[in-house]
Image: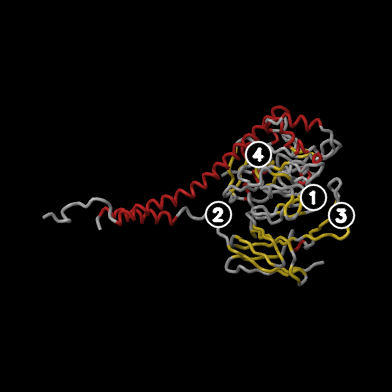
Amino acid sequence: MMTRSQSRPTGFTLIELLVVIAIIAILIALLLPAVQQAREAARRSTCKSSLKQLGIALHNYHDTHSVFPYGSFDSGGYHRRDTWMQQTLPFIEQGNMYEQYADWNGQWVMDTPPAIKDLPIALLQCASDPAGPALGGGGGTRSGGDGFQGNYVTCVGDGAHSWSSNNSGMFYADSDTRIRDVVDGTSNTLMVSEVIIRGGSVSGPNGISWGAGGGYWGGGRGGGFGFTTLEVPNTSLPDEIYACKDVNFPRSPCSPQTNYTAPRIYARSYHTGGVQAVLADGSTKFVSENIDLVTWRAMGTRQGGEVVEIP
Amino acid sequence: MSTHALRCLLATASLSALLATGCGGDGPEVVPVSGNVTWNGDPMPSGTIVFRPADGVARSEAGQIEEGYYSLDVPPGAKTVEITARRVVEGKFDTSNPGEKVPLTEQYVPKEYNAETTLEADVGDTTSFDFSLEGS
């Protein structure tokens, strides 16, 4: 008679089955967060590609005009509060929009016809920010439109933006920076980075906004064209601008000042752990929010003379 | 139990041990800090409180003051504290934007509490700090 112990049983024991199930469960637990992160990674790389193109556009502007566009401009009777964004339009495949804008003879940029100013520009939006395509930042509804608000802003330096004096960055009021002015080295100086739009609509719980980051159509006076490296990326310190959509917006607090004296807009993003930026040499970089503040400030200046080791 | 199953179990256990350890937390260690802020004896209605490292240039952390209470996460260490708040100036308006007249606001907390602050906090074992501010 054959005993059971002599033959190898066919099929799986309960333990083996349980082990297999446990391994599968562990693999799922490993992969699911990875899939979620892959989505954010994809959005981040789209943003990075937009930033790269923006960097190239600014360099093409420099090739054409021998100078980078001004950060913002506010005087006279034609297009006051114009920013680098409108000036760069022909170089980001928006030549027709630029022609229409240039043909319009208004005094204030925020009164540009809505057919022009409300047009969303995909290249200036970061997919990680759920607000896009957003409107606002330039004083709410004026002349029938609200104005497109984007995510990308240029570096004004390592202090609050000032209209009356020279700022330490590459883009500020009436700036005319050339490559040769970037004495710190083009690979050590920031050109463009990101901000968080506080919601896609024109107004938030605290009303309409003037001078919010990315408010290209009218927010220029309030520093909305730029950011400062005074505090680290994604700082918990509030932006200080003329008027805020939302003072308690998640990841992007804001403090309304009702003046244009010293606006401060910090680099912020929805990417995990930092922001992306374009350096003056056109290269893009992910900057950690835990970067040394001394290094971050040094990156903001064009001729600060600091020795920086960019991580 | 066969040695095969045992080996499988062992592999599972070590894998889950690896998972449990994970990649560790990122960013510096922080301590939750909270407290009360009074303005001339009454709770400060709203404002911003900033904890800056007392020595050298480094990351600062800010929180909102709401009805005299604030709470935020701060890396441990010696800090200087800055408090700012704004209020409407009665009867004055700002007209920087064409066609718009908005009530002017001012930052009313004296500079010894912000720009030239004398407020200090040693964040670590102590996590509750109350500030009594005086001014006009």
Residue occupying the far top of the picture: A64
Q: Which residue is mark 2?
A: B27
- Circle 2: residue type: Gly
Does A140 sit left or right of A269 as displayed?
Answer: right
Task: Please tell me in which quadrant of the rendered image residue A225 appears.
Answer: top right
Does B19 sit left or right of B108 as displayed?
Answer: left
Q: Position of residue A110 (x, y in %)?
A: 80, 41
* Residue at mark 4 to residue at mark 3: CA–CA distance: 43 Å
Q: Label 1 marks which chain's residue?
A: A
Which mark is drawn over residue A279? none
Does B2 sit left or right of A236 as displayed?
Answer: left
Q: Which of the two residues, A10 or A181, is positioned nearer the viewer here? A: A10
Q: Position of residue B121 (x, y in %)?
A: 65, 66
SS class, disc 2: loop
* Residue at mark 3 to residue at mark 2: CA–CA distance: 44 Å
* Residue at mark 3 to residue at mark 1: CA–CA distance: 15 Å
Q: Which residue is mark 3?
A: B93
- Circle 4: residue type: Asp
